Amino acid sequence: MRLHASCAARPGPDGYDAVLLTGPPGAGKSDLLLRLLDYGFQLVADDQVIVEDHLARAPAALAGLLEVRGLGIFRLPFLAAATPRLVVRLGVSTLRLPLPEQDPALGLPCVTIDPLHPSAPARVALALEAACGRVAQAAGAFAP
């Protein structure tokens, strides 16, 4: 399945755990991806992601490329593939304690995060840890 999304990953106990950033064009996927790289994530794919056989990867023509609005397209180190664990929809949510949700196409946990919020990279990192079961939540998107 080919998605209009960006993807970043962090090391996990069984390889690399990935987050898929989704949203319409101009939503801030590449910008949040750039901030996630500063937050210790590694680039998997920007703009388009292929998800097959439980792995996310960039299409060959886009592998290692990251568009930075106002600067251009950069060639960066990247992971060939990572295991998708979380879908982050870019947008504004007014819910303080959202209910658990799954992406209908991928069956992965899904949350909405405002990409412009200063804590967006920290929120994505915490959500990924919760989606992977490495941090517990008392109430909200990952609560039992």
Image (spheres, helix red, strand yellow):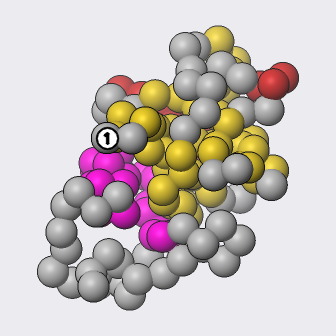
Q: Residue at x 35, y 78 (%)?
A: 141
Q: Is residue 73 above or below residue 107?
A: above
Please state the horizontal and vertical placement of residue 123, each as a whole percent of the image: 31, 55
Asked whether residue 121 is in view, the answer is yes
Query: Could you say where residue 47 lies in the image, as x and y percent from the top left?
Result: 71, 40
Q: Please tell me whether residue 24 is drawn above or below residue 41 in the rendered image.
A: below
- For label 1, the crowd category at 10 Å Cα-Cα, with few meaning under 14, some 14 to 19 and many 20 or more, is few
Q: Residue at x 81, y 50 (%)?
A: 2
- Quadrant position of residue 114: bottom left
Q: Is residue 92 above or below residue 33?
A: below
Residue tagged 1: 13
> Could you tell me how many numbered marks the image carries?
1
How far from the left and from the top, in percent, is residue 38? Answer: 35, 27
Type of amino acid at the residue the image marks with label 1: Pro
Q: Residue drawn 32% across and 49% down?
A: 125
2 magenta-colored:
no
**Nearer-the-camera pick, 2 or 134:** 134
140 on left or right of 77: left
Closest to the observer, 134 or 20: 134
Range of magenta residues: 109-131
Front residue of 84 and 124? 84
Quarter of the image that includes the C terminus:
bottom left
- Asked if residue 91 shows in the view, the reply is no
Residue at image position (55%, 14%) is 77
Secondary structure type for disc 1: loop
Identify the image quadrant of the N terminus: bottom right
